[in-house]
Structure formats: C-alpha cells, structure tokens
Image (spheres, rainbow, N blue to C red):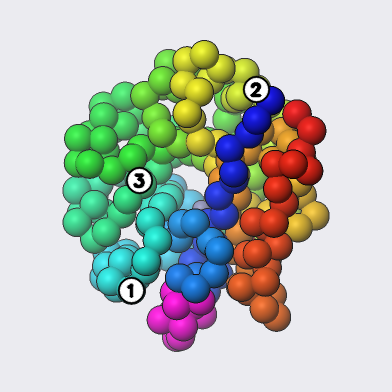
Amino acid sequence: MSKRKHLVAPSVLSADFAHLYDDIAMVNQSEADWFHIDIMDGVFVPNISFGFPVLASIAHYARKPLDVHLMITDPDKYIKQFKAAGADNITVHLEACTHLNRTVHAIKELGCTAGVAINPSTPVALLHEIVEDVDVVLIMSVNPGFGGQKFIETTYRKIRELRDLAAGRNDGLLIEIDGGISNHNALALLKAGADVLVAGNFIFAAKNPVHAIAELKRITPDLISM
Ligand code: DX5
Ligand code: ZN
C-alpha cells in the first residue's frame, strides 16, 4: 500500500513572540509544510493566545499555508475574520459547535479548507456524520490549551479508528495530530495513519529548529510498513 508523504506543521504558539519574524523566516526556509496557528479564547480552553492582528502579521510574512486551530467557543462568529486575516485552513472543535455541519460548510464557502478537531476524551465515532464533509480531522493528543504537554497514548487507537471510519467515504482526508509530538513518537503516529504532524516544543525548543523539522520530515513512507 502506498502512502502519501506526510506534512509537518510547526506550532507558532511555541515561537518567541518578541522575535516572531525570525521564527516565521525560519519556518519559511525549512522543510515545514504549514504554519500551525493556535487561537485560544480563555473560555473553551484555560489559556489565551493571540488574535487577528497577530495572525494578519504572520500571514504577511508566511510563505506557507496557515493552518488555524480555533480553540474558541462559537467559532461561527469569527470565521470570516479569520479568513480575512489570512487563514487557509480553519479547524473548529467539535465540542464547541452546536451546528457542526453548518460551520464546516460556512468555512468552505469562504474558500478555506475545513477541519474538525476532537479533544482526547471525545470518541472518533462522533465524527460519523461529518467525515465526508471535512478536509482535515485534528486529533488532539493532549488536552488543548498549552504547548509542551505529555502525549496521550490512546491517540494511536483513535487514528486507526478514524482511518477505518473514513475508508471509502473520504479517502483524501488528512488526519492531523497535535500535542506532545517529537522524534520519539512520530514514526508510530505515521504508522497508525497520521498525515500531518503538528509540533511546537520539539521544534522551537530545539537547538536547531530547522534540523528538528527536517528530522520529522525525514521519516519516510518507505520506513513505514502498513
Ligand atoms: C495545544 C495546541 C498545540 C500546541 C502543541 O493546545 O493546540 O498546537 O501548541 O505544542 P507541543 O508540540 O509543544 O505539544
Ligand atoms: Zn493546535
């Protein structure tokens, strides 16, 4: 079975905000595929990150797609503004959306790709009615809110369950994993069926972030036995 090449998305949450341009330039020059941008509202998650002006500034210098992960309640109110600020993919949390189908289609109508994220305690089965409509499913492998947390091991099982759920219904679905990812678990995640690896601390706390990104990219499908 051939497998498409996986993507790596550095999480800007772990960047140095006083030298943000340098970190954006580093990601531009690296082998990374996307910028992962975490938006937290202090309500859906117990932390506040940043909003539209910062996103728009990142978009101004970023030369790769912006993958915007909304950890906010009532995202419908703001998706237009996120698109205007430069988002390419907008991912909303299943737990934050009363009318998830409406939200996903509203994102697509804006011209963005649409993602749905699930928390560690949310079962994959709840994606049953939405899996055909989304471009990305983001499986949280930590409880959202902070970078640098410990990876939750049940994630592997959830990836396999999602692969099964999507088979024949949405074979182009990208499965994105977010939280506690490093060179220690990346290969196992890809083996389980992940397509996109988000990494914050592993990349930005590394002595050489460009090498850390290359290390995650270098895990090739050839090394993966399906
Ligand atoms: C957590 C965020 C993640 C986080 C990942 O709520 O969604 O994107 O920045 O950071 P690490 O890789 O350090 O766990
Ligand atoms: Zn994230």
Q: Is residue 119 visible?
A: no
Comparing marks 3 and 1, which lies closer to the viewer?
A: 1
Q: Which residue is mark 2?
A: 161
**Picture quadrant where residue 109 is located:** top left
- Check disc 3 and report the residue beneath it: 90
Q: Residue at x 46, y 21 (%)?
A: 170
Question: Residue 61 has which mark?
Answer: 1
Disc 3 to disc 1: CB gap under 8 Å: no
Task: Give the spatial CA distance, label 1 vs label 2.
Answer: 37 Å
The residue segment tinted magenta is: 16-26
Q: Where residue 84 sits in the image (x, y, percent)?
A: 19, 56
Q: Secondary structure at mark 3?
A: strand
The disc placed on residue 34 is none
Residue 80 in picture, x, y percent from top left:
19, 48
Of the residues shown, which amino acid type is indicated by label 3?
A: Ile
- Dot placed on the residue nearer the N-terminal end, 3 or 2: 3
Q: Amino acid at mark 2?
A: Glu
| 29, above or below 48, in the image | below
**In the image, is residue 79 above or below residue 145?**
above
Please tell me which residue lies in front, 114 or 8. 8
**Magenta segment main secondary structure:** helix
